[in-house]
Image (spheres, grey):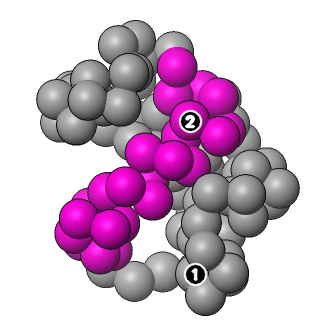
Amino acid sequence: MLTAIRQVWPAAHHESAIRLARLESGLSPTARGCAGACLGLFQIHYTAHRRLMATMGIHSPDQLLDPIVNSTVAYRLFRQSGWRPWGGQP
């Protein structure tokens, strides 16, 4: 999982991204939270971010169980809104 995060996120954010994924999912790519609505390493809320993900070619919640896909969506959310989607900096 660390490799997936490091592959997607820039080096300046590696430690914070890893810390966030550890807090959100325990670094489990198959983690499910929010009654099943939040998925993967970064616990991406599929319904809340469905439009954004559609522009990225993601059309199924199960795609978020891929650590590279999940890390990519998380980084895109971070670029748009900073740490706010997760409630603040990890």
Seen in the picture, residue 17 relative to 51 is either above or below; the reply is: below
Seen in the picture, residue 32 relative to 61 is either above or below; the reply is: below
Check disc 1: other Cα within 10 Å, few if <14, some if 14-19, many if 20+.
few
At 26% from the left and 23% from the top, the residue drawn is 54
Q: Which residue is mark 2?
A: 69
At 67% from the left and 39% from the top, the residue drawn is 67
Seen in the picture, residue 64 relative to 16 is either above or below; the reply is: above
Check disc 2: other Cα within 10 Å, few if <14, some if 14-19, many if 20+.
many
Q: Position of residue 23 (x, y in %)?
A: 58, 65
Amino acid at circle 1: His
Dominant SS type (magenta): helix
Segment tinted magenta in the rendering: 63-85
Taking 63 as reference, is 83 left or right? left
Q: Position of residue 33 (x, y in %)?
A: 44, 36
Q: Quadrant of residue 11?
A: bottom right
Is residue 48 magenta-colored?
no
- Which numbered disc covers residue 13? 1
Q: Position of residue 12 (x, y in %)?
A: 61, 87
Amino acid at circle 2: Val
Q: Secondary structure at mark 2?
A: helix
Observer able to see residue 40:
no
Q: Secondary structure at mark 1?
A: helix
